[in-house]
Image: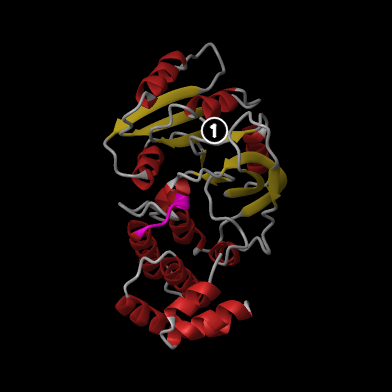
Amino acid sequence: MKISVIIPVYNAEKTISNIIETLLSQTFKDFEILLIDDGSTDNTATICDEYAATYKHNNSSPSPIIRVFHKKNEGVAMARQLGVDNANGEYSIHVDADDWVDPTMLEDMYNKATDENADIVITDYFINKKAFNSDKKEILCIQKPSSTNSQQILIDILENKIFGALWNKLLRTKLYQKYNAKFFYDINYCEDVLIWAQILKHKNIKICYLNKSYYHYFINPNSITHRFNRKSYETRRAFAIKLNEILTDYKYNQAKQITNLSVFTEGFINNCLTKTEIKEEFKKNAHTAFHETKSLRWKLGYLMIKLRLYTIAHKLIQY
């Protein structure tokens, strides 16, 4: 098996068929699809089972295999982990249940990987603000790294110069085991970035860039990534704490500080912090706020936070 495509699925009865069908339309055929049903309460489980029953292993036909795993609801991180644990492919890639892909994605990425004996292939991608098959304007996102050095690419990801998603990157599957890279329970925000932190901090990883776009990322306003409340803030804090535990080399200090400031700022903007928390957390992030922030408006906003003029700060620090 050359590629494993891992799809975490939760209550996706309206979209799951779209991503599966675009995968079944791939020009590349030697791959498996792992559907990880994370305790769905709608008709998702039945749809997944029907696909798995139709696309079983068949020695006489070079076609994709679909396997489905049903588990209790624990969030996307544990769903991804179950997929990785059961992946048979030489390479693997994660896709999301409400996105879609172009027909030559797997073939082009796999050929690039084998031609250059690469551990990771990075591609560009499209952003879509409207769902599959709707009239849509797409935004092309170029993801060319500043270097092929793995540690520099990690810094690019942490500084948001490269998107940290798993779905536009083909990864040699054995790297998960080689570097003991795993997803963490209840960290369902930037769980992909934590994987890259665990892998890319190591040297001698061969990475190549394919300057084509195949993946269509649908920005779903109802997804956990785009909602913010107190629980979102706690999840982001857990992510930042885990990132600090993983990356101990001084070369990542600036990127980690920017991440910590970003978590604090999101919490402040969305009114998720008590006044005591604002005071304590800003004290930890003040140096980064004043030295790494480019916007003069935001710098003034941070000054207002320092002076505890929070109402004025809210007017200045806005997305």
Say whether residue 115 is visible.
no
Neighbourhood count class around disc 1 (C-alpha, 10 Å): few under 14, some 14–19, many 20 upward: some
Q: Residue at x 60, y 78 (%)?
A: 297
Give, as a three-letter code, the residue at label 1.
Lys
User: Magenta: predominant secondary structure element?
Assistant: loop
Residue at mark 1: 2
The answer to if 228 sits in the magenta stretch is yes
Residue stretch rendered in magenta on the structure: 225-229
Q: Nearer the viewer, residue 208 or 39?
A: 39
Up-down relation of residue 105 to residue 198 (above or below): above
Rendered image coloring scheme: secondary structure
Up-down relation of residue 266 to residue 110 (above or below): below
Residue 62 placement: quadrant: top right
Q: Residue furthest right?
A: 211
Percent coordinates x, y for residue 250 in the rendering: 48, 78
Q: Nearer the viewer, residue 210 or 206?
A: 210
Percent coordinates x, y for residue 117 in the rendering: 63, 46
Q: Nearer the viewer, residue 92 or 99?
A: 99
Quarter of the rendering occupied by the C terminus? bottom right
Q: Is residue 187 left or right of residue 211?
A: left
The answer to if 244 sits in the magenta stretch is no
Up-down relation of residue 15 to residue 201 (above or below): above
Up-down relation of residue 97 to residue 268 (above or below): above
Say whether residue 317 is visible.
yes
**Circle 1 SS class:** loop
Q: Nearer the viewer, residue 84 or 70?
A: 70
Percent coordinates x, y for residue 63 in the rendering: 55, 19
Percent coordinates x, y for residue 142 in the rendering: 70, 53
Q: Residue furthest top?
A: 60
